[in-house]
Image (tube, helix red, strand yellow):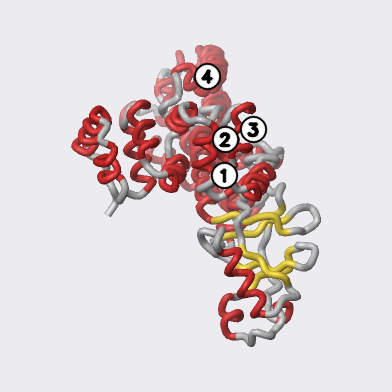
């Protein structure tokens, strides 16, 4: 059953913090998962969270650090000495330790690294800090199990036992040559069922998925998702094995990318959280609002330019909001499907077949909507020619919206711009301007105005 933070538990903890009952705090928290404790600390004030953090053992608090909200983690780290931070990092895997060190100031970073007890651990962390955080090098951990293709099975087992002490979970056994170049992977079943004198080079599996240190994190996620991998090895420019990426790190990438795309689709230009400052939230939201305002002003000029038309045929103006909403929805639906296809790899570039399918779907939808609209207009206003003009205009605008929604994400993707932008205000506001122009243009053509 999932743990839920209760008000009673928070009240008990706050009382023990005030009385400095460290023993009682440990009793209440020691049996909880580190993610649950992190959730509890997020509910407390900074002083209370920091106090509990210092009460618990470092083997537990190290994992808690990774689960905390960014502002709370930053506050707690600011209240710890470089030596105390180093004690936490000694308990973490290299990639997690590197992520936390990367958040520290340059001066504190150097002090923390110098305080790390394990020299090899420190060297691995420093190496990881060289890579961009959005690449495979920035995601990978150094903890892995590897064997030499020239070893026999007996030697292999002995070496694996030594290496496995530093690895929390063994997903794969990687095979390298004398130059540490990745050659393949070793099946545990083959290892257990083969003579101890057999050479690893005779039994390892040569077919293996891997990524380069410079591979973008979203591409790593796509590969692991496609091949259903729990871990993937990382190699450098020379093909040498330098680390591995596990599924828990990729889940974070997928979540972050989904959050980013969701925000872009909503017209939010920066990565923000609900607990960010008013200024940061305003800066993230305002740009698209201003762009939308400018585009809608253009739309108002289009309406003004057609003032004579809707003065003569007043019902034309009544259906402008319906036109804008329908065209916007059609455009967003079309772009959302394209963006999804680009994200999961089912659509890589412009396809005539897919484009034809999207236009056909929009044509069918537009025809149904237009016929319903024609029937409604005919019953309510008895202006059959005007109703026909509105209905045909609606079909044209819907087809335009579908075309825009399909092609714009593909164009952005081709030019290395996140296509998720096209699923929000960009499509809806652009449709408003061009949709209104088409609407009145087609209507005037039919009405002979």
- Residue placed under numbered mark 3 in the picture: 110
Specify which label sits upstream in the sequence, 1 or 2: 1
- Residue that label 2 marks: 422
> Which quarter of the rendered picture does the C terminus lie within?
top right
Does residue 306 show up? Answer: no
Cβ–Cβ under 8 Å for marks 3 and 4: no
Give the distance between the C-alpha atoms of the residues marked 3 and 2, in whole angstroms: 43 Å
The reply to whether discs 4 and 2 touch (Cβ–Cβ < 8 Å) is no
Q: Earlier in the sequence, mark 3 or mark 4?
A: 3
* Labels 3 and 2 touching (C-beta < 8 A): no
Q: Are marks 1 and 2 in contact (CB under 8 Å)?
A: yes
Q: Residue at x 64, y 80 (%)?
A: 154
> Residue tagged by mark 1?
339
Q: Give the quadrant of residue 160.
A: bottom right
In the current view of this chain or complex, which residue is farthest to the left?
8
Give the Cα distance between marks 4 and 1.
25 Å
Q: Label 4, label 2: how many angstroms apart (C-alpha)?
A: 20 Å
Q: List the residue tagged with mark 4.
A: 283
Residue 23 percent location from the top left of the image: 27, 41
- Residue 338's place in the image compared with 162, above or below, is above
């Amino acid at each position: 059953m999932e743990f839920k933070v209760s008000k009673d538990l928070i009240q008990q903890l706050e009382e023990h913090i005030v009385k400095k009952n460290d023993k009682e705090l440990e009793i209440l928290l020691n049996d909880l998962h580190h993610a649950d404790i992190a959730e509890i600390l997020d509910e407390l004030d900074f002083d209370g969270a920091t106090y509990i953090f210092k009460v618990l053992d470092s083997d537990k608090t190290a994992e808690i650090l990774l689960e905390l909200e960014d502002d709370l983690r930053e506050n707690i780290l600011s209240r710890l000495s470089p030596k105390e931070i180093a004690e936490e990092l000694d308990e973490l895997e290299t990639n997690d330790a590197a992520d936390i060190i990367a958040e520290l100031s340059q001066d504190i970073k150097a002090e923390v690294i110098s305080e790390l007890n394990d020299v090899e651990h420190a060297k691995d962390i420093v190496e990881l800090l060289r890579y961009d955080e959005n690449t495979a090098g920035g995601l990978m951990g150094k903890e892995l199990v590897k064997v030499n293709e020239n070893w026999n099975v007996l030697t292999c087992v002995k070496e694996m036992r030594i290496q496995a002490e530093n690895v929390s979970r063994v997903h794969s056994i990687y095979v390298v040559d004398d130059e540490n170049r990745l050659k393949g992977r070793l099946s545990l079943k083959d290892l257990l069922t083969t003579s101890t004198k057999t050479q690893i080079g005779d039994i390892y599996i040569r077919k293996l998925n891997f990524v380069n240190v410079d591979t973008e994190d979203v591409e790593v996620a796509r590969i692991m998702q496609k091949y259903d991998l729990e871990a993937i090895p990382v190699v450098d420019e020379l093909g040498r094995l330098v680390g591995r990426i596990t599924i828990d790190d990729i889940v974070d990438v997928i979540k972050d990318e989904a959050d980013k795309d969701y925000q872009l689709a909503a017209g939010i230009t920066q990565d923000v959280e609900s607990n960010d400052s008013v200024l940061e939230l305003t800066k993230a939201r305002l740009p698209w609002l201003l762009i939308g305002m400018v585009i809608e002003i253009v739309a108002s000029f289009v309406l003004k330019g057609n003032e004579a038309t809707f003065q003569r045929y007043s019902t034309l103006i009544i259906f402008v909001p319906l036109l804008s909403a329908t065209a916007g929805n059609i455009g967003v639906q079309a772009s959302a499907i394209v963006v999804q296809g680009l994200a999961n790899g089912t659509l890589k570039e412009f396809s005539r077949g897919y484009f034809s399918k999207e236009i056909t779907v929009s044509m069918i939808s537009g025809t149904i909507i237009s016929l319903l609209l024609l029937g409604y207009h005919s019953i309510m206003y008895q202006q059959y020619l005007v109703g026909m003009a509105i209905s045909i205009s609606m079909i044209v605008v819907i087809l335009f919206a579908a075309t825009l929604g399909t092609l714009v994400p593909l164009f952005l993707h081709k030019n290395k711009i996140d296509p998720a932008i096209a699923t929000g205000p960009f499509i809806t506001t652009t449709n408003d301007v061009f949709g209104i122009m088409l609407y009145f243009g087609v209507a005037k053509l039919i009405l002979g105005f």
